[in-house]
Amino acid sequence: MPEIESLQSDQAIYPPPRDFQNRARIQSLTEYRALYDRSLADPEGFWREMAQELAWIRPFDRVREWDPPNARWFGGGKLNASQNCLDRHLATRGDKRAIVWEGEPGDRRTLTYRELHAEVCRLANALRKLGVKPGDRVGIYLPLIPEAVISMLACARIGATHSVVFGGFSSEALRDRMDDAGAKVIITADLGYRKGQRVQLKSEVDKAIERLPRVEHVLVVRRGDEPLYLESSRDLSYEEAVRAQPASCDPVPVDSEHPLFILYTSGTTGKPKGVVHSTAGYLLQTALTTRWVFDLREDDLYWCTADVGWITGHSYLVYGPLAEGATIFLYEGALTHPSPGRIWGLIQAHRISILYTAPTAIRSFIRAGDSFPRGHDLSSLRLLGTVGEPINPEAWLWYHEVIGASRCPIVDTWWQTETGSIAVAPLPGATPTKPGSATLPMPGIKLEILDEAGKPVGRGHGGGLYLADPWPSMLRTVHNDPQRHAQYFSQVAGKYFTGDGARVDSDGYLWVMGRIDDVMNVSGHRLGTAEIESALVLHPAVAEAAVVGRPDELKGTAVVAFVTLKVGQLPGENLKQELRSHVQAQIGAIARPDEIRFADALPKTRSGKIMRRLLRDVAAGKATTGDTTTLEDLSALAALRQDEE
């Protein structure tokens, strides 16, 4: 991993809005630094104190044990994640809204904490009646309806390990994940709604289950009104199974290290892997980072737009916010259906105060035009967030000015499925922000930028991004593949390699430069793709860009840019030349794209990440290899192939 060159200059600084700062939990960089410095100077004492935030059934007697790559946190302790998310709020927040939900067709439901607790207990009892025991795995394959959250918490309540599979995945993807997890029961629905279509879920389960002999039962939630086939010896109506159960169920005490869930990664880099997260360490750090990063208040209506099929949905739609007693908003369908104004209409109608979404979604909003958000009342918003990939400065500024009316702080968060919780982000009342930078690490997170020899690089220089010390919410293993888990810590012994290239600027702010796999060696210069993509999106005609390299005999690697244009912009040779010159002016001649391809859409996972691995195959004229089960729209890849021909 030779040094990665950074060709961009640092951006302007945006201080926290004074009104926000005066009411924030953490109100200055001085407060943040005191908290952060204490977490590194005395990690045992710091995390011992922080862990008192959880409700323990039996107190822990050891804070951490670290034998790379294996970590154990809060040894000897017992607790229950469902109890921490529900029971402890009943006395003070029992009648507070826990979930506000809207389906894509417009149907709505609201559950208070007391009502959610009762529903979770009923399902937990139903699962027990089906023979589910602590340590058993339960698959969850649902649309984003309240039952998805109920199912996760019901599993946690009885000590079962859940494995959520996004409701848009195919039967093949479902089968592979459930087979690897060894699921005993699957909870699904007859169908879900997305982009105006009825997505048939039960039929996908029926196809998958033909090769899943260990699955004993399927619980089916009734979402639609179509005739439903239930196989008599295996399938059960969710409503009938749950209705007969009592609304109380004592939470099962589980060990701190008990596996709370297995989550399979989205497949941007190849074969999915089942990341295993523990109970205590994961729950603690997701709750604390929810509090710090989103600065939650009792009257907030908080919307994380991710599905529960992704780690963002696990950590910042379910466990973190509910552990903090927040009110969460769930929306079932596509944010732009039936028009690009749907998301803004939801914010206006429900008076949502915190919006946490992906840069990919933001760029799609930009492409649709400003008239949609400007046609709605977004004054209820007080905080904006981004997640999933580095946000380019142009999209950050649009989000700040058009959606936040230049008054809402933006928390640009960097983290991964494997980190479990946010690792780097601004604290909205304390941290001055720079468009495109995730800024500073969370307490307890020790970042290092290292070269291929494992030596630190200087500020302003790019290298591999590592987490140097263990943290509570870190992955515990890869299910059925401990060697794959060990590889995370093998690049530099005992340090977690994120797979990202990054640099730290003169203020100590982190700039993620893209996946190391996406670094290109152009005429002897190692360039990260993220900077070139950001430069392209700065052009007023460009909505989104993805940059990859293809082999080139002369330069080693040629720069290939796939570009989608804003509405009303027309592709052509003149625009290609203009974009090449624009990148040269923004970064330098070395980054000038050798080839620009216009596309109506880029191949993305269902979590919104661009699958650059597939674009590299297209650019190089190679056949597509590896896992494509998580691809949102196969036609996007097919269209690129057709253009190539």
Image (spheres, grey):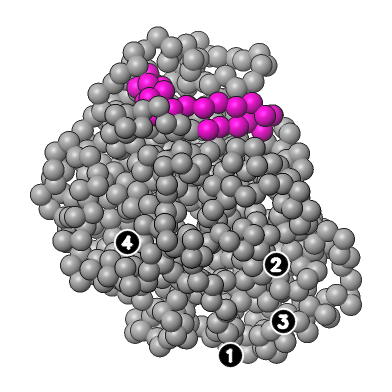
Of marks 1 and 2, the one in the foreground: 2
Helix or strand or loop: what does disc 4 sit on?
Answer: helix
For image coordinates 41% across by 23% down, the residue present is 115
Of marks 3 and 4, the one in the foreground: 3
Helix or strand or loop: what does disc 3 sit on?
Answer: helix
Of marks 3 and 1, the one in the foreground: 3
Asked if residue 392 is positioned above or below residue 19 in the image, the reply reads below
- Looking at the image, tell me whether mark 1 or mark 2 is earlier in sequence order: 1
For image coordinates 48% across by 44% down, the residue present is 300
How many badges with numbers are in the image?
A: 4
Image quadrant in which you'd find residue 251: top left
Image quadrant in which you'd find residue 178: top left
- Looking at the image, tell me whether mark 3 or mark 4 is earlier in sequence order: 4
Three-letter residue code for mark 3: Val
Asked if residue 368 is positioned above or below residue 181 in the image, the reply reads below
Asked if residue 111 is positioned above or below residue 541 in the image, the reply reads above
Three-letter residue code for mark 1: Gly
Task: Look at mark 3 in the image and give the residue it sits on.
Answer: 583
Quadrant location of the N terminus in the rendered image: bottom left
Task: Look at mark 2 in the image and give the residue it sits on.
Answer: 545
Q: Which residues are magenta?
A: 100-122
